[in-house]
Image (cartoon, grey):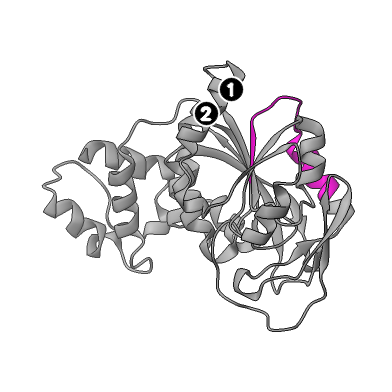
């Protein structure tokens, strides 16, 4: 988890125009300098208490196959690798990737995280460890403007994941863990709660970063469900997207038409708004339509 509110494992838009002094990073204990890139929206985590809290929440153990998205200046990377022994990191910023490669305990993937095949990565680490059932522990400070695409990208690889710990904009986590019949409940809530048990484990205020972002942050723990309901992921995605396309309207105006077009002959109450339907009902409906 990089020392910033948006990692550089993928691109994001500019937010800040102020000029900043170079920040220190480490090459196995030796400081390195890096000027935050505006085009990556870099904000470096500097609060040692928060860093310790994140590491404690993750609880890394020696030998665990851990992958960090957007390590940046290694604010979290260093304490993680000290516990696990070796760490795979995904970093898009070429200068940071170059410096990270100087660290003898890091395996650096210089790439946009949305292009990384986590299933293939898991297979590679399994072969190296001689453990065919090994699963990844994924951590990261996700770029806030495309955090949802990253979460959905990882959903495609959830079978090889043990757990995920991500720093995100707090309002995104509120949506992820929201209950039905609340304003935060939506597409993200349904798609992720179907596949993960999630909890908000740590609040991170803006002053924990340098420069501080304009939003509150938090850390979420995501543990894949051992026995999720079996359903077509593309079908569930389409169904939920249609349902929430006009969330203030009754479902008969949106999902009702979609069901009719598919020749659905079962029973489903469309005299409700999308936010009133529990996750289990959406999943059951997708199963019935499959």
- The answer to whether any part of residue 180 appears in the image is no
Q: Residue at x 39, y 50 (%)?
A: 277
Q: In the rendered view, tell whether residue 106 sits above or below residue 152.
A: above
Q: Secondary structure at mark 1?
A: helix
Q: Are marks 2 and 1 in contact (CB under 8 Å)?
A: yes
Q: Position of residue 213 (x, y in %)?
A: 72, 71
At label 1, counting other C-alpha atoms closer than 10 Å, the crowd grade (few under 14, some 14-19, many 20 or more) is few
The magenta-colored residue range is 51-68
Please tell me in which quadrant of the rendered image residue 84 appears: top right
Q: Secondary structure at mark 2?
A: helix
Q: Is residue 65 magenta?
A: yes
Q: Quadrant of the C terminus?
A: top left
Q: Residue at x 46, y 56 (%)?
A: 149
Side (left or right) of 215 relative to 149 = right
Please tell me in which quadrant of the rendered image residue 285 appears: top left
Q: Residue at x 62, y 60 (%)?
A: 93
Q: Residue at x 65, y 49 (%)?
A: 140
At label 2, counting other C-alpha atoms closer than 10 Å, the crowd grade (few under 14, some 14-19, many 20 or more) is few
Q: In the rendered view, tell whether residue 289 sits above or below residue 172.
A: above
Please tell me in which quadrant of the rendered image residue 171 appears: bottom right
Identify the mark at residue 128; answer none if there is no mark: 1
Q: Label 2 to label 1, Cα distance in Å?
A: 6 Å
- The answer to whether any part of residue 25 appears in the image is yes
Residue in front for this viewpoint, 63 or 174: 63
Residue in front for this viewpoint, 271 or 281: 281
Identify the mark at residue 84; answer none if there is no mark: none
Q: Position of residue 57 (x, y in %)?
A: 76, 40
Residue denoted by label 2: 124
Q: Position of residue 8 (x, y in %)?
A: 62, 60
């Amino acid at each position: 988890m990089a020392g910033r509110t948006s990692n550089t494992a993928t691109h994001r838009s500019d937010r800040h125009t102020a000029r900043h002094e170079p920040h220190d990073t480490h090459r196995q204990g030796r400081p390195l300098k890096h000027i935050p890139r505006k085009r990556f929206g870099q904000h470096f985590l500097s609060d040692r208490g928060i860093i310790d809290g994140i590491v404690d929440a993750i609880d890394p153990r020696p030998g665990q196959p851990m992958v960090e998205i957007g390590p940046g200046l290694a604010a979290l990377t260093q304490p993680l690798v000290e516990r696990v022994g070796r760490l795979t990191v995904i970093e898009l910023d070429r200068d940071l990737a170059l410096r990270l490669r100087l660290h003898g305990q890091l395996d650096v993937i210089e790439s946009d995280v949305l292009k990384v095949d986590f299933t293939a990565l898991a297979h590679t680490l399994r072969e190296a460890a001689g453990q065919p059932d090994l699963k990844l522990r994924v951590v990261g400070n996700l770029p806030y403007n495309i955090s949802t695409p990253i979460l959905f990208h990882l959903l495609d690889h959830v079978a090889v994941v043990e757990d995920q710990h991500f720093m995100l904009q707090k309002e995104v986590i509120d949506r992820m863990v929201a209950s039905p019949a609340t304003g935060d409940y939506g597409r993200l809530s349904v798609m992720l709660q179907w596949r993960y048990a999630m909890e908000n484990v740590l609040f991170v205020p803006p002053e924990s970063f340098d420069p501080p972002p304009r939003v509150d942050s938090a850390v979420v723990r995501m543990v894949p469900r051992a026995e999720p309901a079996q359903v077509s992921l593309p079908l569930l995605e389409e169904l939920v997207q249609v349902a929430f396309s006009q969330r203030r309207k009754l479902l008969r105006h949106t999902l009702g038409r979609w069901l009719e077009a598919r020749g659905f002959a079962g029973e489903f109450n469309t005299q409700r708004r999308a936010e009133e339907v529990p996750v289990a009902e959406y999943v059951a409906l997708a199963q019935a339509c499959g």
